[in-house]
Amino acid sequence: MPRFEPFRALRFSETLPLNEVCSPPYDVLSDSDRLALATRHRNNIVHLDMPISDSGNPYDHAAHILRTWVTDGVLTRDASPSFTLYRMQFTDTTGNLRNVVGVIGALEVVDEGAGGVLPHERTTPKAKTDRLELTRATDANMSPVWGLSLASGLSGLLLEPGELQGSIVDTEGVIHSVERVTDTRRTNAISSAIAAHPVVIADGHHRYAISRTYRDETRARTGSIASGAELTMTYINELIDEQLSVAAIHRLYENISYKDLAASLSPYFTISDAHPVDDSTLSTMNDRGSLCLISKTGSAHWLTPIAAKFAGVRQLDSAYLEHALSAVPHEVRYQHGINEVQHELRSTDATAAILIRPVSVSEIQRTANEGLLMPPKSTFFTPKLRTGFVIRELATR
């Protein structure tokens, strides 16, 4: 099972407003989002996590900024190894108030297939160069991978407050707060609980993959297996309903007409008329047990799976679509959020979209316990963690 350890975290100085220097994760930010954050505050984390240089290498520029911020006291280093409790309070899509808690620490980087740290879905091809180049230049983890622990009772170990480091409210109204824990009895208990069970990667599969590459490069360069590159910064919470809010990642189709897509799906789904998409569509999908096909003009149809056509197929909407369209030439893109899907459908070359239902936590648990993999982009874990609360130096553990 994987090691999970506290580390001496870099944190923004308490004199700086966290709302101004933290940001959403890099992979949900557009260029204009990045510019707005960079302009908002000269010490916003995007200057490090999404570096831009007018001249020279942007990753070397990020390394220079990191060194300067440490020297100037913009970032301060914990005096001793710590865990960071990360709490989020929000109202979920069903209207329920949620309070979730996880812990940020350093998770062991294990080889693919070695066990202990498991993927939960197949990944799509994606360039890993950017994150790898940033890690090489800065020798640091800027944002955490998100892991789910099978350790029963982990949430209980995280309930007691730590030393408050600050909180922010994001644009969606989610309250993010972080607390430092340095008491060795408590950090040992958290480490032991997590290390006794597998961890499932929920978000950040590619970042975990580049951590393997960087670990191997560091071993070759130093001849050591004791560097900070043996672990990577990870947020971990318990894999239970109370601690997870899972949304769907919907599908947008190109290079296939709406008519041909519907015809290809008709042997596998009962297709019936639906009202135009609105705020009630997702709940109606759950009540009906249906997916929702949307045309570029906004017309909609229910797709109700024909059970006999999916014998032996995982009971996941993503798996149903993958099975039904396996022999049909098409291109698919992925997008979360109904409003975002509709915008993409209107403004891009997409010919159709299909809204799918969220994967249940019990199915994610089964995936982990049985060592299975879901199709790519089956789950979207929310809310997204903020970047900037904690930075982990790989040369200092």
Image (cartoon, grey):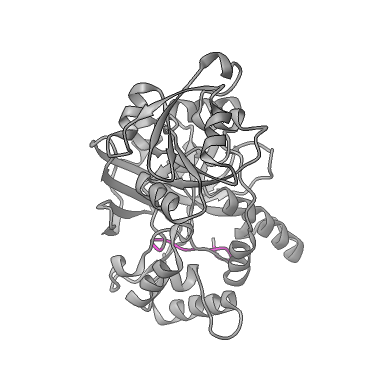
Q: Residue at x 44, y 56 (%)?
A: 347
**Which quarter of the figure has residue 186?**
top left
The main secondary structure of the magenta stretch is: loop
Residue 176 lies, in percent from the top left, at 30, 53
Q: Residue at x 58, y 62 (%)?
A: 131
Is 122 located above or below residue 14 in the figure? above
Q: Looking at this rendering, what residue extends furthest in the bottom direction?
A: 55
Query: Does the stretch in magenta take in 216?
Result: no
Is 187 located above or below residue 393 in the figure? above
Is 317 located above or below residue 181 in the figure? above
Q: Nearer the viewer, residue 93 or 356?
A: 356
| Magenta-tinted stretch | 388-396
Q: Residue at x 59, y 22 (%)?
A: 313
Residue 337 lies, in percent from the top left, at 38, 46
Q: Nearer the viewer, residue 53 or 190?
A: 53
Q: Nearer the viewer, residue 211 or 341?
A: 341
Q: Residue at x 64, y 63 (%)?
A: 129
* Quadrant including the N terminus: top right
- Residue 198 in sight from this viewpoint: no
Is 18 located above or below residue 125 in the figure? below
**Which quarter of the figure has residue 56?**
bottom right
* Quadrant including the C terminus: bottom right
Q: Nearer the viewer, residue 97 or 310?
A: 310
Residue 165 lies, in percent from the top left, at 30, 60
